[in-house]
Amino acid sequence: MELTETLLEEVYRKVSIKLEGKKEITDEMIKDGAYEILSQITQGEFVSVSQRLQVVKHCLNSMKKLGILQPILDDPSITEIMINGPNHIFVERAGRLYELEEHFESDKQLEDLIQKIVAKVNRTVDSSNPICDARLEDGSRVNIVLAPIALEGATVTIRKFPEKVISFQDLIDWGSITPEAAEFLQRCVEAKYNIFVSGGTGSGKTTFLNALSNFIPSDERIITIEDSAELQIQKVKNLVRLETRNANTEGKGAITIRDLIKSSLRMRPERIVVGEVRGAEALDMLQAMNTGHDGSLSTGHANSPADMLSRLETMVLTGCSFPIEAIRQQIASAIDLVVHLGRLSDKSRRVLDIVELKGYINGDYVINSLFHFEREGESGGKIVGKLTRTRERFENIHKFQMAGMDCSDINQMIDGEKTKE
C-alpha cells in the first residue's frame, strides 16, 4: 500500500466533512475519523502502523496546524521558509537556500493555508488588500503577497521564531560581537542611552534588539511597538506589548506604528522599544527620545551608520515639512549610539560598527567610531576578523554620571587601556 499525496488529501477532506459542524474537534476525534476513512478507502488492503500514523499526522496537521508546512516549521535546522506559489518551497539552513520536494496540491490549498494564518491574528488578506504581515502562534514573522501581485502565485515568507531567546552570550559565542563591546552596550542600556540598530535585510537586527532589551533593568516600565510581535523581553514585569493592525475590508480601522508611538506617550513609559521604523513614525520616535524617554531602542534598514542617519532624515520628511537643519539637529540630539550589523559573504551575521553620535556642527553630523570590524581574510570558506576597539574616546558620558555609574573604566575600555594593564 503506497500513501500518495492524493490519498492523504482524500482522507483529510473526508474527515473534515465528517467532523464539520462539531463545536469542538479533539485530536482523538480526528484520529478515529482518519482510521475509519482510511479503512473505507483501502478496503482491506494492508496498511502498516507507520502508514496509519502518517495519515493521522497529516490530518492533524491539516486540521489543527498548518498542513504540509507543519513538519517544515517543526524542523529546528530551518530558519526561514519561502513559498513561491504552490509548486516551489525553499528553506534556509545554516545560511544556505535549498528547494524542498514538498509542494501544495493547488493554488486553493495554498490560499486556504494563508487564510488560516491571517485569521488567527485577526488580519485580512484578499484581492483588495493583497499584501499582509502576520505572525504564527509561536511568534514567527509572516509576510504574504497574493496573486496577481505575485505573478507566480501567492508568496509566503516565514522568518521562524527562535525556540530559545538569543542572549549576548550566544552572540559572543558565535563571534558576532566581542565581550568588551557587549559589556559596553550593556552599560549603555542600563544608563539609558538611546540606541539605534541598523543593518540590511537578514542581518539580525530584531535578534540584536531583543538581546539589548533584556539588559533593561527589571523595575522599569517598557512599551514595545511592532508590526508583528517578535520581541521576547523576559525579566521586565511592567511590560506593555503593542502591535499594529491593518485596515479592514472597507479600508478603515488601521492602527499604525505612528499611532502606537503617540498613544504610548500617554502610558507613562520609561522606555519605548520600536521593532523597526520605516516611515513618518521616525519623527515621533525621535521626539519621544528627546522628551524624557531616554533609553529607547529601535532598528532600521541601512548600509552603514551614516546611511542610517540619512535614511532617518528621509523618513521624517515623509511626515512633515521641517527644515532639514532642524531634522538633523533633532536626530543628533535624540540618538546616542548607532550599532550597525551586517551579513557577510560566508552568511555569518556580525556587528560591524558601534559609533557615538556626538552632535551636529556646521551642517555635518559628528560621528565618533568606537568599535569597527576588521576583516583579516578567509579560512575554510569562513571570514576571519574581529570587532576591534578604536582609539577614539567615548565623550558622551553625562548619562553614566546621571545614573551614578563609574565612567572611568568605560573610557579605558574604549581607549584600549585595559589591554595594556
Image (spheres, grey):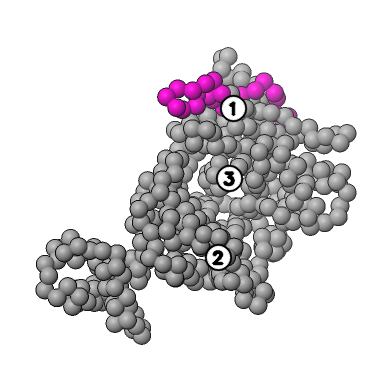
Closer to the N terminus: mark 3 or mark 2? 2
Q: Nearer the viewer, residue 145 or 211?
A: 145
The stretch of residues the image draws in magenta is: 375-404
Residue drawn at x 44%, y 33% as measured from the top left? 173
Residue 140 visible: no
Closer to the N terminus: mark 1 or mark 3? 3
Residue 125's tag is none
Q: Which residue is mark 2?
A: 147
In this rendering, the answer to whether 45 lies above or below 416 is: below
Residue 201's tag is 3
Residue 381 in the image: state x and y as whole percent.
45, 27
User: As shown in the figure, which amino acid type bears the numbered disc 2?
Assistant: Ala
**Distance from the alpha carbon under mark 1 to that under mark 2:** 42 Å
Q: Nearer the viewer, residue 409 or 206?
A: 206
Residue 373's tag is 1
Residue drawn at x 29%, y 64% as measured from the top left? 5
Residue drawn at x 57%, y 52% as measured from the top left? 219
In this rendering, the answer to whether 288 lies above or below 200 is: below
Residue 261 visible: yes
Q: Indicate yes or no whether the magenta region holds residue 14.
A: no
Residue 27 in the image: state x and y as whole percent.
28, 72
Residue 231 in the image: state x and y as whole percent.
53, 53
Closer to the N terminus: mark 1 or mark 2? 2
